[in-house]
Image (spheres, coloured by chain):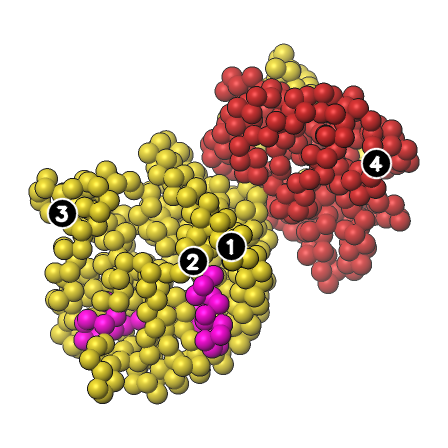
């Protein structure tokens, strides 16, 4: 039985997560295996990426990528119109969905109309965002995730913890245990190759049954109406070519003007993502199978989702739309590395998730309004971003936009603070009082318990009452 | 600029900074009316409250002089955030002017090739504070200043990684903040030095506060205090 829930209000974050954001970070911090798994992956990606930086001049490539994406977003309406026209020219169908619910209705309706019982999926964050699996499940249609990581999560009934490596929080032994349970036998190897081979056999059986293949879209190329789907496993190639119908689900911001731009972004993405200079498979799909072609689906549907994106154009958050969903900001983030993506309670985790989830949901959504605060604003995310999104600035702006009982409370406190601190006399009086308080509470140069907001400090650390501090 | 953390916890930091500059022959004024750069309110998501305090700071530091700050974070706030905070406001030009004149202490020493003479011998380990590193884009000037002062620096692992302080973050997510602080304190002590030094007092209070709670025998001093000996 699925614990995942679809959001009736079209929200992005998950509703089945337990506790507050802070409570989830505490739970995650207790899990030492999780920390080890995350650190192993993050370190290895970071090192590979740094090697790329030297070899390919990633820093210069980033400047161009930033310009490309900014211009794409500026010209978005025109690019989407062109994309739409070209896809139709190639014999495909294009649907513009205002929100996730509309997109899900279209896809489930299509499945019903064609009598489809099984849908095979390749990895797609957009479908995770719109909760497509849950919608298909409700409609009585079986969904099979064919990306190894996504399949593992489907078996574990868990949410993804990373944009491109959804099961990165699990290690080999944990995966082997899931496979044994699914296969109903202990006869599953636990070495890497053995596990992959096992999954391949189980999943191939499903491709033959699927009436629809659903994929995400890394990039749409407006000039030719082509969708690009990058992957390392080959499953997306099967998903987009084996079943009679291919449905590609694309966030509306993922479009570039032409092949010159696409070539650059397709190169930057895997480098930033995992330090790989090219994806193993780059699937370029323009419409359905044409006369005389031997491969490809009979029908091609492109579903373009707004879901709150369009409203961000022209705002102080516009640059968030430049994101190419590589995940570099996740593994660079000390918070994500410590607690993983699941603690965020949203398909999009890490710094970009903390920025866009509340933007797509609205500033007062209880499921995501605290996310922008889960950052020390260290700036590692902005530095890692291959398209130069100033994530730490966006996090600060997202905080200013957030509305919750906590932010209202801190608003009152900062109102008082501001009155005291804009006048030297009241500032100095407050400081004198504070230092007296510190001295009164200090023992051997340390205070172990402070009142008010200081309690949050002394919960995990002491406060030196003399400086330089005593040992 | 004294910085509010120095006023609250460690007046020795701004006093050392003043002495270090004077030893180099710099004429130093410490405006008595100054308060805070307003970063706490800005990062807590209250830009209007922040602006009211920042306006006062702009007033206090009007004039042609360079403004030296013994903090990469406060300097970064003025240099990087003031232009955004005052965009389209009457004080925009004054804010941009102050941003152009503001510089962190060791950057100022490097820029003017100033030598305050010998400091503490060390060994110390240097924590690159995030705002010094990724807002002020500076990792060399504190190392140069320490080397010129004859202070031995033993580099720790992941010195560019966040210590988990993060201002209001340290109060909102204490457990996560504390975990990162503990990791930082352990890496600092593993460098072989017993003392961690940084351009930012906030990081140091946090790192040494966690170390004391966890029983890690680590001391801490601001870079100005190491130069001032």
Name the residue that disc number 3 marks.
Answer: A182
Q: Chain of mark 1?
A: A
Locate residue A419, reporting x and y percent. Answer: 72, 42
Could you tell me which secondary element the residue under label 2 belongs to?
loop
Give the residue displayed 35% in from the left and 67% down from the top.
A282
Mark closer to the observer (2, 1): 1
For image coordinates 13% across by 74% down, the residue present is: A115
| Residue B114: numbered disc | 4
Q: Which residues are magenta?
A: A239-268
- Disc 1 from disc 3: Cα separation: 43 Å
User: What is the distance, in whole Å, between disc 2 and disc 4 at their CAs?
Assistant: 45 Å
Q: Dot 2: few (<14), some (14–19), or many (≥20) neighbours within 10 Å?
A: some
Q: What's the chain of the residue with tag 2?
A: A
The quarter in which the C terminus of chain A is drawn is top right
For label 3, the crowd category at 10 Å Cα-Cα, with few meaning under 14, some 14 to 19 and many 20 or more, is few
Residue beneath disc 2: A277
Q: Write down the residue under mark 1.
A: A55
Pointer 2 and pointer 1 on the same chain: yes
């Amino acid at each position: 039985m699925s614990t995942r829930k679809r959001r009736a209000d079209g929200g992005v974050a998950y509703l089945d997560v337990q506790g507050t954001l802070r409570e989830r970070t505490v739970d995650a911090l207790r899990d030492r295996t999780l920390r080890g798994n995350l650190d192993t992956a993050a370190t290895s990606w970071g090192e590979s990426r740094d090697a790329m930086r030297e070899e390919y001049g990633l820093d210069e490539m980033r400047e161009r990528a930033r310009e490309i994406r900014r211009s794409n977003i500026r010209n978005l309406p025109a690019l989407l119109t062109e994309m739409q026209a070209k896809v139709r020219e190639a014999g495909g169908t294009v649907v513009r969905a205002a929100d996730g619910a509309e997109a899900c209705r279209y896809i489930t309706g299509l499945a019903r109309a064609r009598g489809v019982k099984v849908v095979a999926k390749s990895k797609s964050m957009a479908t995770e965002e719109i909760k497509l699996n849950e919608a298909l499940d409700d409609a009585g249609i079986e969904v099979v995730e064919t990306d190894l990581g996504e399949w593992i999560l489907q078996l574990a009934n868990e949410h993804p913890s990373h944009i491109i490596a959804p099961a990165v929080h699990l290690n080999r032994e944990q995966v082997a245990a899931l496979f044994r349970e699914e296969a109903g036998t202990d006869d599953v190897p636990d070495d890497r190759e053995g596990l992959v081979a096992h999954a391949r056999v189980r999943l191939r059986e499903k491709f033959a049954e699927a009436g629809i293949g659903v994929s995400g879209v890394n990039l749409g190329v407006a000039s030719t109406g082509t969708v690009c789907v990058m992957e390392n496993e080959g499953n997306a190639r099967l998903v987009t070519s084996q079943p009679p119908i291919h449905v590609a689900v694309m966030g509306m911001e993922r479009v570039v003007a032409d092949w010159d731009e696409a070539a650059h972004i397709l190169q930057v993405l895997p480098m930033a993502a995992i330090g790989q200079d090219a994806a193993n498979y780059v699937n370029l799909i323009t419409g359905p199978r044409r006369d005389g072609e031997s491969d490809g689906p009979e029908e091609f549907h492109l579903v373009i989702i707004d879901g709150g994106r369009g409203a961000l154009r022209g705002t102080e958050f516009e640059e968030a739309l430049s994101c190419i969903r590589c995940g570099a900001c996740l593994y660079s983030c000390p918070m994500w590395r410590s607690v993983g993506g699941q603690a965020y309670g949203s398909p999009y985790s890490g710094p970009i998730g903390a920025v866009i989830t509340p933007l797509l949901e609205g500033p007062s959504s209880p499921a995501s309004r605290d996310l922008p605060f889960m950052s020390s604003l260290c700036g590692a995310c902005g530095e890692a971003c291959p398209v130069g999104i100033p994530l730490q600035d966006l996090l600060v702006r997202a905080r200013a936009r957030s509305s919750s009982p906590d932010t209202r409370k801190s608003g009152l406190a900062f109102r008082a603070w501001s009155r005291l601190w804009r006048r030297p006399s009241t500032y100095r009086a407050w400081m004198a009082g504070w230092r007296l308080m510190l001295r009164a509470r200090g023992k051997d140069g340390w205070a172990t318990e402070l009142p008010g907001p200081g309690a949050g400090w002394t919960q995990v650390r002491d406060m030196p009452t003399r400086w330089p501090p005593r040992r | 600029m004294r910085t509010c953390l120095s006023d609250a916890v460690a007046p020795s930091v701004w006093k050392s900074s003043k002495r270090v500059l004077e030893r180099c022959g710099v004429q130093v004024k410490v405006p008595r009316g100054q308060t805070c750069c307003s970063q706490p309110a800005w990062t807590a998501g209250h830009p209007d409250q922040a602006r009211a305090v920042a306006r006062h700071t702009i007033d206090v530091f009007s004039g042609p002089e360079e403004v030296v700050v013994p903090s990469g974070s406060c300097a970064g706030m003025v240099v990087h955030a003031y232009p955004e905070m005052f965009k389209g406001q009457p004080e925009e030009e004054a804010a941009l002017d102050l941003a152009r004149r503001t510089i962190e202490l060791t950057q100022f020493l490097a820029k003017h090739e100033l030598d305050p003479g010998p400091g503490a011998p060390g060994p110390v380990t240097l924590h690159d504070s995030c705002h010094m590193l990724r807002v002020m884009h500076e990792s060399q000037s504190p190392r140069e200043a320490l080397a010129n002062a004859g202070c031995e620096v033993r580099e720790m692992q992941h010195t560019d990684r966040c210590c988990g302080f993060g201002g209001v973050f340290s109060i909102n997510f204490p457990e996560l903040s504390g975990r990162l602080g503990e990791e930082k304190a352990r890496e600092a002590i593993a460098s072989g030095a017993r003392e961690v030094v940084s351009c930012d007092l906030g990081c140091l209070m946090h790192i040494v506060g966690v170390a004391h709670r966890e029983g890690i025998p680590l001391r801490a001093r601001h870079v100005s205090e190491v130069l001032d000996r």
